Amino acid sequence: MDISVIVPVYNEVENVRPCYTELTEVLEGLGVRYEIIFVDDGSGDGSSECLEQLAAVDQRVKLVQFRRNFGQTAAMSAGMDMAQGEAIVTIDGDLQNDPADIPLMLDKLHEGYDLVYGWRKDRQDAFWNRRLPSQVANWLIAKVTAFPVRDLGCTLKVLRREIAADLSLYGEMHRFIPILAHWEGARCVEVVTRHRPRRFGQTKYGIWRTFRVILDLITVKYMIRYAVSPMKLFGGLGLVACTAGLASGLGAIAMKVFGGVDMTGNPLLLATVFACTVGLQFFVLGLLGEVTARIYHECQGKKPYRVRRTMNVQQTFRGNQRAA
């Protein structure tokens, strides 16, 4: 197998067939052996039925149906686990990524790069709740990781199979794939890709994801590949506690400077120290939880997803499933 295309799908019933059509047109034009792996992440809008119909008439379409929604990282992980191609392509199923960019990215792979990731230079999304938060997150990630990235959220990527085999994806690490691969020694390059307005369905992303990126970034920075859910809980509590401590500290300073209030025995000072201490403890607990969860997953060989059914798939998954 030359190319495996992984397409995570979650409630994209109107986009599934057009996505399949565009992908097959591009891949047929390359004259290569390929497979398209659709990972149904617990859709409830009819996407599953549409994908089953496609898999029934085209053996090159591989289908994995999750028991419930496990998230995009789990979908990526499942697709990479079963991919047979020497080159692996990841692309969104909402038709905003243009499959016509795949040949250009494959050319970069042939030049000797191990991973090629897209930059949606002319992004066709709303500014305030999509583009601006994304720009802030990408700037922060580039500063913290010292990795030159301008669009880490672009799903369109091409990587070698051996690079994908070295990636352990848990939590929500799919957005950090280029950084994780780079730290594993992969040669990575960014290319400009086209981006199209969403025609059907609704986006599954929002401004709240920017705040979750910050917590993921802490994990990636200090633990590289150790990433699952504990940091989301304890990191969030830590942020709340530290923010409360900062607010009470500023309040105490304001009372002293502008009101001339004697700070001796002022409860705000005690509240500041207490809240910041608790916040730091939550962060430490979160990081310890990341290590513990990673060890658990590695020792048990557990996957961050559960499969209900597969079609046209030779790969064996952990857990009960029904194959067709």
Image (cartoon, grey):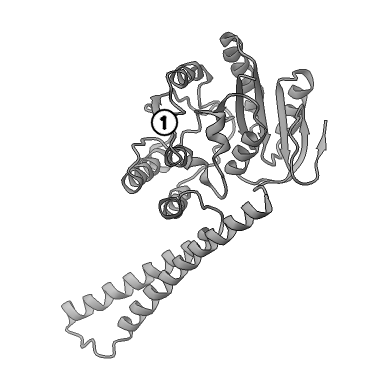
Q: Amino acid at mark 1?
A: Arg
Q: Is residue 160 above or below residue 292?
A: above
Q: Is residue 286 above or below residue 197?
A: below
- Within the image, what quadrant is residue 312 found in? top right
Residue at screen point 38% across, 26% down:
122
| x, y percent for residue 316 | 75, 37
Q: Secondary structure at mark 1?
A: loop
Q: Is residue 147 left or right of residue 158?
A: left
| x, y percent for residue 140 | 34, 47
- In front here: 162 or 116? 162
Q: Is residue 150 above or below residue 218?
A: above
Residue at screen point 31% across, 46% down:
143
Density class for disc 1 (Cα within 10 Å; few <14, some 14-19, many ≥20) is some
Residue at screen point 79% across, 22% down:
56
| x, y percent for residue 241 | 42, 70
From the image, tell me which residue sits under label 1: 187
Question: Can residue 249 be seen in the rendering of this structure?
Answer: yes
- Within the image, what quadrant is residue 118 found in? top left
Residue at screen point 75% across, 20% down:
59
- In front here: 123 or 109? 109
Question: Can residue 9 be seen in the rendering of this structure?
Answer: no
| x, y percent for residue 119 | 40, 29
